[in-house]
Image: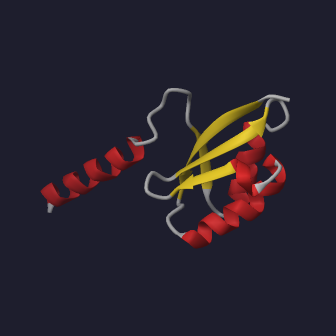
Amino acid sequence: MATETRVFRIRGMDCAEEVRALRAALAPIVAGEQRLQFDLLNGTLTAEVREGEVRIGDIEAAVARTGLRAEPLEPGTAADDTVRDRWSRARASATAA
């Protein structure tokens, strides 16, 4: 069966402890930890899922059970938007101060 890549922005993910919790919650859904990749710097999760077997809602619900929030990124969305957003907010805050 074919696989597809799903990318999510994970709101609130910023440490290894949260990654461990996410791995535990998601591994059974995607058929193994080896199908999950986490990028703490950009706050993203990439999951290789079997086509037609895992719904986006399944992943969102599992992430929500860890206390975090998953937002699917549309194909073609740059994952580094998160970093750009953080720098923009930091610059704006520094300027305001």
Query: How many numbered tags mark residues here?
Result: 0
Q: Residue furthest bottom?
A: 17
Residue sitting nearer the eye, 36 or 53: 36
Residue lying at 83% horizontally and 29% vertically, measured from the top left = 52
Residue 53 image offset from top left, x and y in percent = 85, 35
Image-based side of 13 in relation to 53, left or right: left
Residue 55 image offset from top left, x and y in percent = 78, 37
Write down the quadrant of residue 57 in the picture.
Answer: top right
Task: Indicate whether 77 appears above or below 20.
Answer: above
Write down the quadrant of residue 81 in the picture.
Answer: top left
Residue lying at 71% horizontally and 61% vertically, measured from the top left = 23
The quarter of the picture where the C terminus appears is bottom left
Residue lying at 49% horizontally and 64% vertically, measured from the top left = 14
Image-based side of 43 in relation to 59, left or right: left
Write down the quadrant of residue 17 in the picture.
Answer: bottom right
Residue lying at 49% horizontally and 58% vertically, measured from the top left = 40
Image-based side of 85 in relation to 62, left or right: left
Residue 48 image offset from top left, x and y in percent = 71, 41
The quarter of the picture where the N terminus appears is top right
Residue sitting nearer the eye, 93 or 28: 28
Residue 45 image offset from top left, x and y in percent = 59, 49
User: What coloring was used for the rendering?
Assistant: secondary structure
Task: Indicate whether 13 appears above or below 92.
Answer: below
